[in-house]
Image (spheres, rainbow, N blue to C red):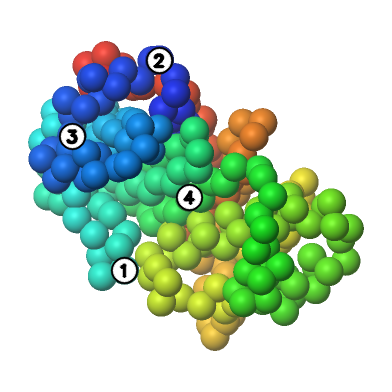
Amino acid sequence: MWRVRPDDPAWSLERAHSLLNDEERARAARFRFEDHRRRFIVRRAARRAILASYTGSDPRVLVFTENDFGKPSLAGEPGAGGLRFNASASAELAVIAIGTEREIGIDVEMVRDVPDAEDLVRRFFSATERSALARLTQTERRSAFLACWTRKEAYVKAVGRGISMPLDAFDVSVLPDAPAVLLATRPDPGEVDRWSMHGFDAGPDHIGALVVAGAPAAIRVIDGPPDKLAW
């Protein structure tokens, strides 16, 4: 799991821009605010550089495709083999999870007040999750909401069904200091045993969750650009 901070000088904006394709450069140019443009450029370039460090390819020639629900993958890359990846970003942090031979999903959120949190809980959380949050103090609910949200998002992204998957069709643990756990899945209760959920160190100002298919995974956290051959 790679942690990328676009404000880190190690991620050269000039170098990052040189790795993008024409479509990515056009998207970057459409951003109104410079901070948003910088984040987009570094995040996309980091994804290319990091994946290229695994495939042995030139990061500029990587081609990405998406499934019907928007989950990205590498298209026809000879060195990719069973490589799987997923990415998420919030404020000045992006995370990119890399695995092999099994699907993976990751989500990260900056720790902050979410003004519409109560509405999101009513609309998208399961009865079990709502009940668990209701037992907490108002202060505790802020971090518990974000913990629950990232765990749910990571699972949906791992499954690869996007917004077509109802967020209240499964239960996750909600306490941020407790292990991240997929507790139940509906309508197929057996689905819960096909995935492993993990928390990870997202830094002091963020919270994150990772979901992989199959047995629990060992997570190695890496900061900064990959080796100079790719970056």
Q: Earlier in the sequence, mark 3 or mark 2?
A: 2
What is the distance, in whole Å, between disc 4 and disc 1 at their CAs?
A: 16 Å
Task: Kindly identify which residue carries mark 3.
Answer: 20
Which is more N-terminal, label 1 or label 4? Answer: 1
Identify the residue position indicated by label 1 in the image.
Answer: 69
C-beta proximity under 8 Å, tags 4 and 1? no
At which x and y percent is residue 9? 40, 15
Q: Which residue was labeled with disc 4?
A: 106
Q: Name the residue: 40% across, 46% down.
A: 87
Counting from the top left corner in percent of width and height, residue 73 is at 25, 52
Crowding around mark 2 (Cα neighbors within 10 Å: few <14, some 14 to 19, many 20+) is few
Marks 1 and 3, how far apart at CA: 23 Å
Question: What residue is shown with label 2?
Answer: 9
Q: Position of residue 158 (x, y in %)?
A: 43, 59
- Please name whichever residue, 89 or 188, is drawn nearer the observer in this view of the structure: 89
Would residue 23 appear left or right of 86 to someone viewing this image?
left
Mark 1 crowd level (few <14, some 14–19, many ≥20, 10 Å Cα): few
* Residue at the spot 32% in from the left edge and 41% down from the top edge: 32
The Cα atoms of the two marked residues, 2 and 4, are separated by 25 Å
Residue in the picture at 72% in, 79% down? 127
Q: Position of residue 149 (x, y in %)?
A: 61, 59
* SS for dot 1: loop
Instruction: Say which label, 2 or 4, has the lower sequence index.
Output: 2
Q: Nearer the viewer, mark 3 or mark 4?
A: 3
Measured in 3D between alpha carbons, the distance from the residue under mark 3 to the one under mark 4, in whole angstroms, is 23 Å
